[in-house]
Amino acid sequence: MIHFVLHDSKDSVAVVVAEGVKAGMTLNGWIMDEDRMTSVKAAQDIPIGHKIALKDMAVGDTVWKYAVDIGKVVAPIHTGEHAHVHNIKTKRW
């Protein structure tokens, strides 16, 4: 089963595509640009359609999704955590 998808192997977050992701689960992910699988352990419950962190990120780090800079980290994010508006903000304003 595929739990998350990322478009580029350099992405720091991926989109959860399965319902029922709970803390402690080992999740399988598909890296589209390389057509290969990867895995990460969920550190928190993550709703479908939301992002999961694929690596530890510090305040000020750039967040990459679809090989595009989607914002900056405003609160530390650890691998497997829910990455969303509470810890990522746009750089536009």
Image: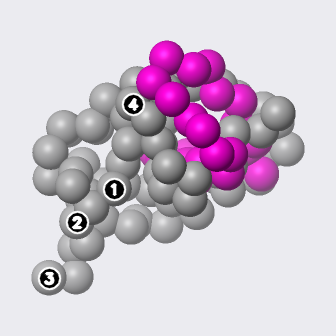
Circle nearer the viewer, 2 or 1: 1
Q: Which mark is residue 44?
A: 4
Q: Amino acid at mark 1?
A: His
SS for dot 1 = loop
The residue type indicated by label 4 comes to: Gln
Is 61 situated left or right of 21 in this image? Answer: left
Mark nearer the N terminus (4 vs 2): 4
Q: Earlier in the sequence, mark 3 or mark 4?
A: 4
Mark 3 closeness class: few <14, some 14–19, many ≥20 residues within 10 Å: few
Q: CA distance from mark 2 to mark 3?
A: 9 Å
Amino acid on which the number 3 mark rests in the picture:
Trp
Q: Residue at x 49, y 17 (%)?
A: 24
Location of mark 3 (residue): 93
Residue 88 occupies which quadrant of the picture?
Answer: bottom left
Q: Quadrant of the N terminus?
A: top right
In the picture shown, does residue 54 fall above or below 74?
above
For this view, does 29 lie left or right of residue 54? right
Q: Which residue is mark 2?
A: 89
Residue interval drawn in magenta? 9-32
Q: Describe the element under mark 4 as helix, strand or loop.
A: loop
Could you tell me which secondary element the residue under label 3 belongs to? loop
Badge nearest the viewer, 1 or 3: 1
Mark 4 or mark 2, which is nearer to you? 4
Give the residue number, with chain letter if any, for mark 1.
84
User: Residue 89, how many percent across, how many down?
Assistant: 22, 65
**Residue ID at (57%, 53%):** 48
